[in-house]
Image: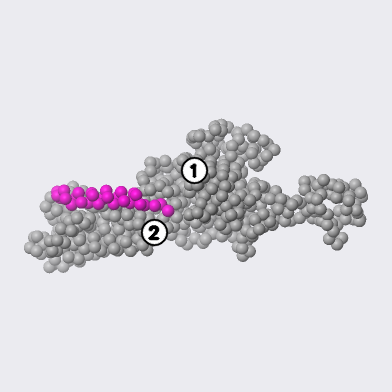
């Protein structure tokens, strides 16, 4: 994340001034660019997190849905929550936006408590819920106008409606919309109040690949304007493309929290390079490098596993001995592999993937 | 979730107008309520109006004609149908569909949607009651109401009482089907005591006594008195006010937004 996203633009400034900073220790005026705590940790570039969840626990009739989850989302970050069905993702989201009260643990959104400061929270947080519907006999434009009237400083409706491909549907009744169109409408309604934090629960489920990519583009545009986005998703591609960091949740617990690349690397115990050497060489040439953990031979190919600047280290060591590496391939393991490795489960049914 | 409570406005007031507008559109586009309530009442009124025999005053009915007896009963019918059926129906389905829950995470509290629904229903009731009175005085020779203020007061407390009962049905019913069942259970006995099937005047005195303490029976009594005699007695007005308060509190206690 680049530091400029912390400096809210003019439109956000106005909202920020209206926000009472009740119970906020970091009461730095929001309309001033925040000083980065540490520029080297991109996720801490702003002075306080947009979303802060600590030791969240929620049970339903003795069944543990969320069991001690903690994480913080930086302002302007796109934060993903991944996990299999029933992992506690939706419960986490519902507690975050104040729809459910946690059993224990604390939640703060820009310093506000979703239970105690509901009124303020509703003005600055836009939510898309998994299951929501609207009256069958209202037209799209009528539903949008209604929700727009709820906010004192709404977003640009035309832009939102076009970005989500609903411009041609404004006059259609809600009941005539397809599942994907209803889904896109609920994303419009989540963003219509120009929220500072958007919480989206499976926003692209049921969308065709093109609509999904359009939605991603919109989310990236919002992030560039400084909106913080918390995204529950099923789709690895979505998490990899959009998220600055991803929380893996399984059985109510936080299993891992890292960048998508970091998770992928962690899951397979490092990076992997595969190449065809121009001349035979002794394994010891590479085995001595601090970056290398394992060397395998696959016919004439060599596969090196390791960490850090593995590719550079290997190529440099080879070149120093007069060996050229041909056809260098970096392992293309995905977040999905990471997920399976970390949870022992598959994230989605195969048929569900795009 | 919070129990039923009227929240102070933190959202733009214009939002309430938008909610009312959309609820009115929905009522217009799903006209079952209009047809069952307004249409049926108007049709019955016209039938009673054109049968000459029903215009003759009858000693059995206390000197009134059958037509004159039925005008207040049809007014009670309109208030009853709309409040018991076309108020709980949408509210329960909004709860089922998660619309009230979705509203609870916007600056507009879901109680505003309930308020919008009440406003639309109240307007429909008042317009229909007005229409029934205009048609019966204009076309069927009904004399103008003796006490218009008393009549207006009777209609307003009756609407409040029936809204209370309708909201209790909306609070008790988890599904739209259950709401329809409860509506039928409440509606037909209430209409019996209002005199829809047999005018109250010809009921045995024990049943007539019960009728005075039912909401639609008290409605008919208060309206009939203000139409033909003068300002209605306190008893039916107090009965209606008691229903409004008691059922309003029950609804407030038990209504759930999700």
Which sits in the foreground, A342 or A240?
A342
Residue at point 50%, 40% (across, down): A113
What is the chain letter for disc 1?
A
Where's residue A12, x and y in %?
54, 38
Residue at which label 1 appears: A114
Model colouring: one colour
**Residue drawn 59% across and 42% down?**
A72
**Most frequent secondary structure within the magenta stretch:** helix
Helix, strand or loop for disc 1:
loop
Whether callout 2 and callout 1 share a subunit is answered: no
Residue B62 vs residue A267, the one in the foreground: A267
Can the viewer see residue A159? no
Which of A87/A12 is in front? A87
Residue stretch in magenta: B231-258
Is residue A305 shown left or right of residue A337? right
Residue A121 x %, y %:
49, 42
| Location of residue A21 with respect to A218 vertically, above or below | above
Q: Chain of mark 2?
A: B
- Extreme-front residue of the structure: A62
């Amino acid at each position: 994340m680049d530091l400029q996203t912390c400096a809210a633009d003019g439109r956000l400034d106005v909202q920020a001034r209206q926000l009472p900073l009740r119970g906020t220790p970091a009461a730095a005026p929001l309309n001033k660019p925040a000083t980065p705590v540490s520029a080297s940790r991109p996720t801490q570039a702003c002075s306080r997190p947009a979303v802060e969840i600590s030791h969240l626990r929620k049970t339903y009739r003795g069944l543990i849905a969320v069991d001690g989850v903690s994480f913080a989302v930086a302002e302007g970050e796109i934060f993903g929550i991944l996990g299999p069905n029933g992992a506690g993702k939706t419960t986490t989201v519902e507690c975050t936006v104040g729809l459910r009260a946690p059993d224990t643990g604390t939640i703060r959104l820009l310093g506000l408590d979703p239970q105690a400061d509901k009124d303020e929270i509703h003005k600055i947080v836009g939510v898309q819920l998994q299951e929501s519907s609207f009256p069958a006999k209202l037209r799209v434009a009528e539903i949008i106008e209604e929700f727009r009237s709820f906010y004192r400083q709404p977003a640009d409706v035309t832009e939102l409606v076009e970005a989500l491909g609903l411009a041609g549907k404004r006059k259609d009744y809600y009941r005539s919309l397809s599942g994907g169109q209803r889904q896109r409408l609920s994303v419009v309604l989540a963003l219509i109040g120009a929220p500072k934090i958007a919480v989206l629960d499976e926003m692209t489920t049921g969308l065709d690949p093109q609509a999904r990519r359009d939605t991603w583009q919109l989310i990236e545009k919002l992030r560039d304007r400084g909106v913080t986005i918390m995204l529950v998703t099923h789709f690895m591609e979505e998490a990899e493309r959009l998220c600055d960091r991803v929380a893996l949740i399984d059985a109510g617990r936080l299993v891992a929290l890292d960048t998508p690349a970091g998770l992928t690397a962690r899951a397979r115990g490092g990076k992997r390079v595969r190449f065809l050497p121009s001349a035979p060489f002794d394994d010891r040439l590479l085995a001595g490098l601090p970056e290398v953990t394992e060397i395998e031979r696959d016919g004439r190919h060599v596969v090196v596993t390791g960490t850090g600047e593995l590719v550079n280290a290997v190529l440099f060591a080879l070149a120093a001995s007069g060996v050229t590496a041909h056809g260098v391939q970096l392992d293309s393991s995905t977040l999905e592999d990471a997920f399976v490795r970390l949870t022992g489960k598959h994230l989605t049914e195969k048929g569900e993937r795009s | 979730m919070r129990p039923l409570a009227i929240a102070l406005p933190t959202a733009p007031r214009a939002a309430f107008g938008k909610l009312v507008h959309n609820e009115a559109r929905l009522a217009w586009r799903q006209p079952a309520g209009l047809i069952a309530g307004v249409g049926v009442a108007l049709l019955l009124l016209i039938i009673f109006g054109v049968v000459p025999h029903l215009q003759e005053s009858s000693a059995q009915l206390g000197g009134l004609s059958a037509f004159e007896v039925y005008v207040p009963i049809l007014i009670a019918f309109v208030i009853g149908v709309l409040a018991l059926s076309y108020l709980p129906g949408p509210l329960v389905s909004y709860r089922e569909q998660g619309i009230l829950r979705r509203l609870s995470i916007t600056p507009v509290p879901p109680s505003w949607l309930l308020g919008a629904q009440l406003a639309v229903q109240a307007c429909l009731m008042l317009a229909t009651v007005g229409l029934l009175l205009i048609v019966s005085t204009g076309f069927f020779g009904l004399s103008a109401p003796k006490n218009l203020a008393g009549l207006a007061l009777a209609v307003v407390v009756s609407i409040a009482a029936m809204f209370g009962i309708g909201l209790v049905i909306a609070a008790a019913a988890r599904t739209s089907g259950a709401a329809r069942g409860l509506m039928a259970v409440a509606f037909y006995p209430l209409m019996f005591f209002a005199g829809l099937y047999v005018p109250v005047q010809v009921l045995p005195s024990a049943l007539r006594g019960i009728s005075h303490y039912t909401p639609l029976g008290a409605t008919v009594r208060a309206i009939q008195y203000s139409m033909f005699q003068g300002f209605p007695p306190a008893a039916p007005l107090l009965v209606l006010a008691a229903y409004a308060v008691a059922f309003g509190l029950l609804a407030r206690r038990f209504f759930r937004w999700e």
